[in-house]
Image (cartoon, rainbow, N blue to C red):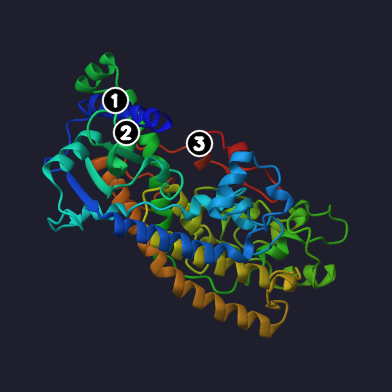
Amino acid sequence: MRHHRRLATALAMTSQLKRALSLCGGVSNKPRVVILSENTWRHAASRHSERMRNLLAPGLTPPDHPINAGAQRQRNQRRKRDGWTALDPVNPVYNFLIEYYGLKGAKGPRRLARWSPDPALLSRVDDSEHDGPEISPEVRSAALKASANLGGVLLEKAKLDDLGDTLHLRGGVPVPTGTTEDGELYGILYNPAVFYHGQFGTSIEEQQQRKEGNPHRDEQLRKTMAPFQWYQSILATTLRSDPVLHCYGLHEWAMQYHPDGADPPPSSKYQSTLPLRVSRQVINDTVERKGIRCTHVDALRFFAPAAGPLNYHGATLERTDQLRLEQKGCVHAHMDLLKIGLKLGSFVNPDLMCDIIETALEARRLDVEASPYDATGYGCDVVAIETSEGRRTYRDRQIALMDRAEPVRRRLLSAYDVFLSLAFGEEGRSGYDSNPVGMHREGDYAAPERFARAEPGGEPWRRNLIER
């Protein structure tokens, strides 16, 4: 019964998509349906889940950890089935996945372990439309019907039970074999065009407005594209940047900076379960030695207020400064590849997501090992940047990490290019530049938080907007 309800919902969504797309100027002249055999995609999904588990295993809590005790019975049963538990909120290498990127509870790691096909399969220049079985006319017709004639990557014999378990639920379109009563599927289809085009108007009035030109629809489309275009611009400008190799990870020290007469640093609460490995005086002396050269605008808000004037790039930065300052040597910029990858949801190459996680974790380890905290209890080494030898070590590892992150960042930018083209067509192919707000052309939308200010100990971006 549950399957029938979900199938009926999917079919209703398909009907809405048809009406919406009739207003969007039609569809591609030759929609593509690429089919992956069940053996192919299940093997890929299993391999992805196993690799993600290996990457996250050191940071997962045991099943009897208190953080896992509050789950409902259904979630407990699910955990017993798939083995996923919550990440440890006090593990200094892994807790950034919770604090920065919201991967809370067992659902956080479980989300990372889900699989979906690479959308780039739809942008291949060859005419092949299968990786395994040939597509019969009946299957192709059903896939086109379910996708409102947009096509997509069809996972042969995928079931509704796979959605939200093995496969990403978001963006998965069931392709029924016939009537809604039998509940049988040819498989599950993914295509960003299907997901995003279905968000725009479906009423009779909106149909007429679309034919005549619908400013509201155009504005909504620009708003939907804007965050993706912003991240696309960040990736592009970072790749073009010159690396800064003399920051030495002092942002963590700036968070603990506490000279005589200053208020206690509010960010000292972060990593509060870890002891300091150096004295407060050593922290102050290290920060004051040559000041701070932190280019990561998100980090400034976590500085101790007294450390702000010591930052070479200013005690106050604006969100748009990220396009000017973000640079390819920044450890936190490598960690933020995960945030940018997660924004694509189910429409990104799963192998790339594993590479992003691996890069982000390596960056975080260097971040922690170069900090004033003692994280040796979690298997971390010490990079003593308060010494000349430690700074040389940090720089060497920073360069090695930058070289490793570079191709990952390029692949992620390529994934954004493919996604925007598939999801939004010609409007998504407008390109990117380094203008102050990350907009691609005149009339593009910029979210209010793009015009926000960061200050040490200040409010989050959305609460510290600049009046315009």
Q: Nearer the viewer, mark 1 or mark 2?
A: 2
Q: Nearer the viewer, residue 440 or 4?
A: 4
**Mark 1 crowdedness (10 Å alpha carbons): few <14, some 14-19, many ≥20:** some
Marks 3/1: CA–CA distance: 31 Å
Q: Secondary structure at mark 1?
A: helix
Amino acid type, mark 1 = Gln
Q: How many numbered callouts?
A: 3
User: Which residue is pictured at 59% across the width and 53% down the height?
Assistant: 298
Q: Earlier in the sequence, mark 2 or mark 3?
A: 2
Where disc 3 sits, the SS reads helix
In the image, residue 43 above or below residue 157: below
Tell me the tag on residue 183: 2
The residue wearing badge 1 is: 16
Q: Is residue 200 above or below residue 295?
A: above
Q: Residue at coordinates 62% horizontally, 48% vertically from top-left?
A: 105
Identify the residue position indicated by label 3 in the image: 448
Q: Residue at x 73, y 55 (%)?
A: 270
Kindly tell me whether residue 429 is visible in this rendering. Answer: no
User: Among all residues in the image, which is located at the extreme top?
Assistant: 205
Disc 1 to disc 2, C-alpha distance: 20 Å
Amino acid on which disc 2 is placed: Gly
Question: How far across and down, in percent of the image, does residue 31 sit?
Answer: 16, 43
Is residue 23 found left or right of 113 in the rendered image?
left
Horizontal placement of 366 versus 262: left or right?
left
- Residue at disc 2, secondary structure: loop
Q: Position of residue 346 (x, y in %)?
A: 40, 48
In terms of image quadrants, where is residue 289? bottom right
Amino acid type of the residue tagged 3 in the rendering: Pro
